[in-house]
Amino acid sequence: MFNDAFFVAVGFVIFVALLGYLGVHKTLVKSLDDRAHKIHDELAEAKRLHEEAAEVLSSFEAKRIAAEAEAEAIIAQARAEAQELARDASARLAEFITRRTAQAEDKIAAAEAQAALDVRAAAADAAVKAAEIVLAADSKGATGDTLVAKGIADLSALMH
């Protein structure tokens, strides 16, 4: 009846009773409860951090979308300004070409007028010299000299 198994069973009962008397089960339960609360708090903190991260992510996403829209608006404005500058430059270039063409035409007209005057003056001088030579050869003496001088003066007045 009192064999080894009996003494082990009695020792075990005494051990469990001693643990119960010392309140080890309460300490174990309290420790497990504390651990459960700690895990619960960590899970709550993790959930809160996850929600905050989601909010930050959504705010950054909204900022990114706004920045992209702003960048597109800036690009569109820059394109419009570039087109306006190109139109202005084209208009100024056309105006400059028109002005330079008019200046060149004026210079050409002035050069033509001067050339015509130079040709007339050269022709008049040649005609005067030719008339002088012809008249000098045809008329000799005082009467011829008078006619030649008068003809040269008349011709010179007519030509200039």
Image (cartoon, rainbow, N blue to C red):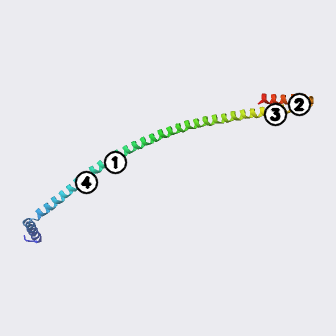
Closer to the chain start, of discs 4 and 1, is: 4
Left or right? Give the position of 130 relative to 115: right
Left or right? Give the position of 118 relative to 30: right
* 79 is higher (above) or lower (below) than 54: above
Closer to the chain start, of discs 4 and 3, is: 4
| Residue under numbered circle 1 | 60
Res. 46 mark = 4
Closer to the chain start, of discs 1 and 3, is: 1
Q: Could you tell me which quadrant the N terminus lies in?
A: bottom left
Residues 5 and 61: in front is 61
Q: Could you tell me which quadrant the C terminus lies in?
A: top right
Res. 15 mark = none
Q: Are marks 4 and 3 in contact (CB under 8 Å)?
A: no
| Residue under numbered circle 2 | 145
Q: Amino acid at mark 1?
A: Phe
Badge 4: residue crowd in 10 Å (few <14, some 14–19, many ≥20): few
| Residue under numbered circle 3 | 125
